[in-house]
Amino acid sequence: MGGLVSLVTLDLSYNNLSGSIPKSLEALQHLDYFNVSFNSLIGEIPNGGSFRNFTMDSFKGNEALCGISKVHVQICSSVSNHKSKRKNVERASFIIFGVVAITLLVCLAFMVVRYKRKEKTTREVDELISIVPERISYYELVQATEQFNEINLLGTGSSCSVYKGILNNGRDIAVKVFNMQLKGISRIFDVECEILRSIRHRNLTSVISSCSNEEFKALVLEYMPKGNLEKWLYSHNYCLNLMERLNIMIDVASALEYLHHGYSMPIVHSDLKPSNVLLDEDMVAHVSDFGIAKLLCNGDSFVLTTTIATLGYIAPEYGLEGLVSTKCDVYSYGVMLIETFTRKKPSDDMFCEDMSLKRWVELSLPEIPNEVIDANLVMNLDEEQIDKNLQCISSIFGLALKCSADSPGDRINMKQAHAEL
């Protein structure tokens, strides 16, 4: 476990474990919750790394553990035996530290005398800049985007515009500028900031910084050079093969599984669609746009909302009653899964009255769905490969229909969907 360098939470309480706590766990820099209470552990509690922050609640119920007094366990015998020696070492260290400190102060005084005030001020500012975290000002964003020039416009949405920018250090960025003329835009900005600063996953958009005042609000995001999934599905200049589409949808499923099941509170994206799936240089998908996302706090399984997402991807209970839950994201994912392999939008003119994208695919099964799939997926292939592709897509459509069932109780969850894909 000492090699799990990204481990954040480890709860092994009530497991009847014996032996000692591995000292290698001190190397886990991101470990912020640790609980081995009510086991049969023995020996010294590690006191380095993250273990400096853990309290007695992490270790109670283990009678044979020992360590420092802060965690309210017995003092280790080795600690007691070397207590006086440690005091002597500490006393000597203080003396040496004092001598070194005085020497450094004298040297520093000579340096201050030698240089003029202006030079001194410049040096201090330079030293400060080196330790302060990166901050990006409004004027830097104006410069990076060439005054938000339309030639740098990557796309527009209902509440924002996204521009490509290049910082002074040469780094490519995407600047998401919120439309301050819209009612409630500050709340949308705050929600997205609240969620994006807390979540970390390889298939979610990474935030570099933000810029906010009463007249301007923007997020500085990692630039995605390959655009979004919608562009790749519907542009005549691009074409995704079967495995590329499948890998993208697996990435999206992985992100949703994390949001629904891997974070301390379930997060509902609420507006999942191809234009909100961004692709990096390696065609890895990143789910973006959390402006109308919902946090399910206090054990709630759903929340009520008046915010309406994109038509065609909205679950029935969301559109009719305003009930938002993780099952709404599952429904949207099912619709997007069908769209990805049919290359048909749910808003296509062919879908009217009782016919919908989901119903169209549903009627094609359980036969081989060669009439509804995107023709590009079987073009220029031999007969054996065409048959394999059709069998694969038929299975994908079956999964998509499990995700997009009309009743929330009939839908599978994202853990199941991710595993099946």
Image (cartoon, rainbow, N blue to C red):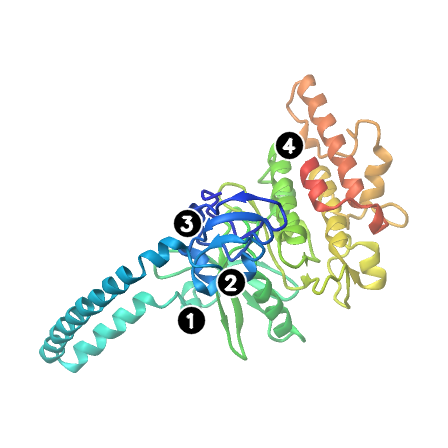
Q: Marks 1 and 2, Cα distance to the nearest angstrom? A: 40 Å
Q: Which residue is mark 1?
A: 137
Would you name the residue on which mark 3 appears? 27
Residue farthest to the bottom, as pictured: 117
Relative to 35, 303 lies left or right: right
Few, some or many C-alpha atoms within 10 Å of disc 4 (few <14, some 14-19, many ≥20)?
Answer: some
Q: Secondary structure at mark 1?
A: loop
Residue where numbered disc 2 is placed: 55
User: Where on the picture, by quarter, is residue 265?
Assistant: bottom right
Disc with the residue nearer the chain's start (1 vs 4): 1
- For marks 4 and 2, the one nearer the N-term is 2
- The three-letter code of the residue at mark 4 reads Leu
Which residue does the image show at 59% across and 49% down from the upper left? Answer: 39
Mark 3 is surrounded, within 10 Å at the Cα level, by few (under 14), some (14 to 19) or many (20 or more) other residues, namely: some
- Residue 212's x, y, as percent? 51, 74
For the C terminus, the image quarter is: top right
Instruction: Give the quadrant of residue 33.
Output: bottom right
Q: Which of the marked residues, 4 or 3, is nearer the chain's N terminus? A: 3
The first of marks 1 and 3 along the sequence is 3
Q: Residues within 10 Å of mark 2 (few under 14, many from 20)?
A: some
Residue 242, which numbered label? 4
Foreground residue among 98 and 341: 98
Q: Is tag 2's residue or tag 3's residue first in the polypeptide sequence?
A: 3
Mark toward the viewer: 1 or 3 = 3
Count of picture labels: 4
Answer with left or right where residue 351 lies relative to residue 211: right
Residues at discs 1 and 2 in contact (Cβ within 8 Å): no
CB atoms at circles 4 and 2 under 8 Å apart?
A: no
Q: How far apart are the alpha carbons under marks 2 and 3? A: 18 Å
Q: Nearer the viewer, mark 4 or mark 3?
A: 3
Q: Amino acid at mark 3?
A: Ala
